[in-house]
Amino acid sequence: MTGHHLILGELDDFITGETINDTDDERYRQKIARLLVNQKGYLKSDIEPRRKLMVKADDREAIVKIDFVINVLNRIGMIIKFGPGSIVTRRRPTLAASRLLTSYQIPIAVVTNGKDAEILNGLSGNVLSQGLEMMPSRSELKRIAEQDDFNTISNQQAEIESRILYCYEVDGSCPCDEDICRL
């Protein structure tokens, strides 16, 4: 047992093929990865798992992980943030991440606990739909991306979003959480 996650052994990551720790949370992530490829039509090359993101709040810094970054039409079109428990409490940090990963607003942000999901409009934060099966398919995300303006995120907004993400993901997190690296 490492940290607060029971390590059940090892498994091969469905997207990358690399060997990773088998935990209850990772089993949900792998379920989502299979759904994206097998049911939603994404190519494995469209999906980047475990993207690291630097967040700052004043002089404090940390690296958090975004579970899945989905690329379409040479841009990030969607992110997926997994967390056990209530998904409502994870909306705001997921939106913040959708405004920090790149210089533009990512159109779709998904928050999920592996059983349910909320699909959010990245710009407005409104819930577009609910349920894992309602995540946009590859062709749907391409259509969304073709119609999106990919609005630029100002430095001031990025600073605010970084603080928000830091508060939700780092402040108050378990010191043994291995998905966060405090710098």
Image (cartoon, helix red, strand yellow):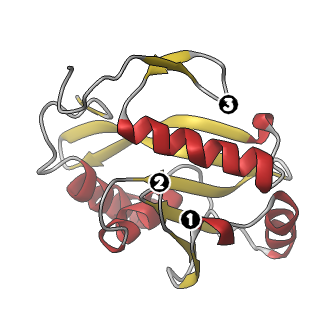
Which amino acid type corresponds to the residue marked 3 in the rendered image?
Answer: Ile
Circle 1: element type: strand
| Front residue of this view, candidates 20 and 27 | 27
- In the rendered image, the quadrant that contains the N terminus is top left
- Give the mark nearer the N terminus: 2 vs 1: 2
How far apart in space, not on screen, are marks 3 and 1 (Cα)? 20 Å
* Residue labelled with disc 2: 81
Along the polypeptide, which appears first: circle 3 or circle 1?
A: 3
Task: Report whether 112 appears left or right of 84.
Answer: right
In this rendering, would 152 be left or right of 62? right
Report whether residue 142 is seen: yes
Q: Residue at point 79% right, 62% down?
A: 137
Q: Picture coordinates of residue 79 (x, y %)?
A: 58, 55
| Of residues 173 and 33, the one drawn nearer to the viewer in this rendering | 33
Identify residue type, mark 2: Lys
**The residue tagged with tag 2: helix, strand or loop?**
strand
Q: Tag 3: Cα neighbours inside 10 Å, few (<14), some, or many (≥20)? A: some
Identify the disc placed on residue 109. 1
Camera-nearest label, 3 or 2: 3
Q: CA distance from mark 2 to mark 1?
A: 8 Å
Q: What residue is disc 3 on?
A: 15
Residue 99 in sight: no
- Secondary-structure class at tag 3: loop
Do the residues under discs 2 and 1 have CB atoms within 8 angstroms?
Answer: yes
Q: Quadrant of residue 2?
A: top left
Instruction: Residue at 45% x, 16% y: name it.
Output: 10
Label placed on residue 152: none
The disc labelled 1 sits on which kind of residue?
Ala
Across and down, in percent, residue 87 comes to 37, 68
* Nearest to N terminus: mark 3 or mark 2: 3
